Image (cartoon, grey):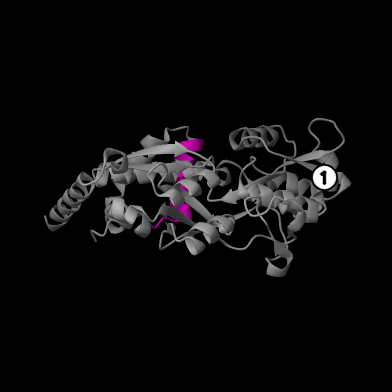
Amino acid sequence: MKMKLSKFALIASFAMSVATTSMAQEKVMIGEPSWPGAKIIANILKTVIEDELGGTADIVPGDNAVIFAGMDRGKGDIDVHPDVWLPNHQSFVDEFVTSKGTVALSKSGYEGKSGFCVPKKFAEEHNIHSIYDLATPQASELLDSDGDGKGEVWIGPSGWAATNTREVKLRDYGISNFLVGSNEDEALALANVGAAIREGRGAAFACYSPHYVFKLYDIEILEEPAYDEAKYQMVQPDADPEWFAKSHVETSDAPKTIRVGYSKSLEQRAPLVADFFANIALDAETVSALLQEMVANNRDATEVAKEWVANNHDRVDGWLGLK
């Protein structure tokens, strides 16, 4: 009974807080970058706001630059980035969180990792286990799917910070002498990976965790040199138009931390939502399971999010300060 009264009081408080704002400010606008993890987390945020707090929320597709600019303005056009990867998005964090102070990050994050993958069977058959094994004539021949004399490696869609980093890595590892980086949409790229695996062909592609691809296929992350700050100088396009020439990356990425970013203006406009964003605590295993349901099992993201929230009230109540 105490918990039910606490939740009722929280929702009543939310209703009172939004009653003093305009209709435009009542609705929380959730940015949605193009990768699957961001999509499912955006729907988790929307479900909690609407089903647990009694508020309203909409999801707005956009790239990182657009979402961070919207949070910076604090006008309610975009209020939250559901999937901020550090250090991938460090330049945005440096500008909007550290320097301007207009954006905040959730207190806790979860660990992610990224690299380049190949099918495990392909790796074993051709002794390809290191990133440098892609910088060879053999790899060029094995991964040449269109017969143009150069192999292909998918490095991610244009606009992702990680895609820019991988483009630099291809150059600095010497891979670009043998393989061409491609930028197809992720769903198409991974469908091509699946087809290659079924047909016994080779494939090389950017991979990251949490992600459903590790549950779909038997794949191997290629070894890279251990992270070395002195050999990892990445400049993103938003920081300098000459980013590619000024970057040098010849080691694995630093350990990843993934957080929710939100406009500091929410602390006045919708304080209970801001508290929720500050206290949300996800983990890689949970996100991977959600992605499995959404992508691998071809289910609607809204449906998956609602089901997860309904089955995890204790955890959600912790995010809302009810435990």
Q: Is residue 147 above or below residue 49?
A: above
| Residue drawn at (85%, 39%) of the image | 141
The answer to if 231 sits in the magenta stretch is no
Query: Where residue 275 appears, x then y in whole percent?
Result: 31, 57
What element does badge 1 sit on? helix
Residue at position x 57%, y 46% in the image: 214
Quick check: 62 left or right of 18?
Answer: right
Residues 222 and 182: in front is 182
Residue range of the region highlighted in magenta in the rendering: 281-296
Q: Is residue 162 above or below residue 323?
A: above
Picture coordinates of residue 61, whole percent (x, y)? 48, 37
The C terminus: image quadrant: bottom left
Left or right, residue 133 beside residue 120: right
Q: Identify the main secondary structure in magenta.
A: helix
Give the residue drawn at x 71%, y 45%. 121
Q: Residues within 10 Å of mark 1 (few under 14, many from 20)?
A: many
Within the image, what quadrant is residue 1 found in?
Answer: bottom left
Residue 282 inside the magenta-drawn segment: yes
Q: Which image quarter: residue 229?
A: bottom right
Residue matched to label 1: 139
Q: How many marks?
A: 1
Measured as percent of width and height from the top left, residue 276 is found at 32, 55
Q: Is residue 32 above or below residue 172?
A: above
